[in-house]
Image (spheres, rainbow, N blue to C red):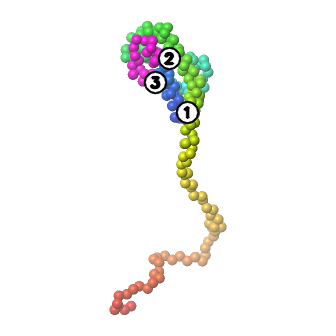
């Protein structure tokens, strides 16, 4: 339930997609006879990250989360099984390769992802806080210089007192200033 423009929401979605796709790919590769192609991994990461970003808009219950994660794992299985094959062969391969071990691997990946959503973020933040606690005293000992304070506006009471007053006895002179010293003249000239 974060702001759609928040970079934290994107980071959380990317982190969840990385965990979900990695677990699913490891389980799928361990139960199948082939590696998961890099193109399938990138496609799965992008789609899972986008779905996680969309789903982060509001809080979901455990039934909705479980159903959604099982559906995501099913789509990931078809994506990984398809790999570089065309759609018809990918669908047949996905159905043929869905053994009990493969099903268990994807259900386990969905369960771990659900656990990550329920408790993993809090545990990760707690672990990060624990890891950075020893670094806090040295980092707080270093003080950065304070930002310069902006100048305080001075009260302009004199201007306010004379606002609107017509100055009747003012003298305004225009032109260059009068020289205080007499001009020097060349020797032998008069004037």
Residue holding disc 3: 45
Q: Is 148 on the left-hand or right-hand side of 84?
A: right
Q: Nearer the viewer, residue 90 or 32?
A: 32
Residue 130 location (% of width, % of height): 58, 32
Q: Which of marks 3 and 1 precedes in the sequence?
A: 3
Q: Which of marks 2 and 1 precedes in the sequence?
A: 2
Q: Main secondary structure of the magenta part?
A: helix
Q: Nearer the viewer, residue 78 or 177?
A: 78
Can residue 116 be seen here? yes
Residue holding disc 1: 131
Determine the secondary structure under disc 2: helix
* Gap between marks 1 and 2 measured at Cα: 32 Å
Residue 17 location (% of width, % of height): 49, 24
Is disc 1 surrounded by few (<14), some (14 to 19) or many (20+) residues within 10 Å? few
Residue holding disc 2: 73
Determine the secondary structure under disc 1: helix
Q: Which mark is residue 141?
A: none
Q: Which of marks 3 and 2 precedes in the sequence?
A: 3
Q: Nearer the viewer, residue 172 or 47?
A: 47
Q: Nearer the viewer, mark 1 or mark 3?
A: 1
Q: Is 117 on the left-hand or right-hand side of 44?
A: right
Residue 156 to residue 114: above or below: below
Determine the secondary structure under disc 3: helix
- State which quadrant residue 80 falls in: top left
């Amino acid at each position: 339930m974060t702001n759609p423009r928040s970079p934290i929401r994107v980071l959380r979605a990317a982190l969840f997609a990385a965990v979900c796709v990695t677990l699913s790919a490891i389980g799928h590769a361990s139960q199948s006879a082939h590696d998961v192609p890099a193109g399938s991994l990138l496609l799965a990461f992008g789609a899972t990250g986008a779905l996680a970003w969309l789903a982060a808009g509001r809080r979901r219950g455990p039934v909705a989360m479980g159903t959604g994660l099982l559906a995501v794992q099913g789509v990931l299985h078809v994506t990984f099984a398809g790999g570089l094959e065309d759609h018809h062969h990918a669908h047949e391969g996905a159905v043929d390769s869905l053994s009990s071990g493969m099903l268990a691997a994807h259900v386990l990946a969905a369960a771990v992802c659900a656990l990550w959503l329920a408790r993993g973020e809090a545990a990760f933040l707690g672990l990060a806080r624990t890891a950075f606690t020893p670094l806090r005293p040295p980092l707080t000992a270093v003080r950065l210089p304070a930002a310069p304070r902006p100048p305080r506006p001075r009260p302009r009471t004199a201007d306010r007192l004379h606002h609107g007053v017509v100055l009747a006895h003012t003298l305004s002179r225009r032109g260059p200033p009068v020289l205080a010293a007499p001009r020097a003249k060349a020797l032998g000239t008069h004037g």
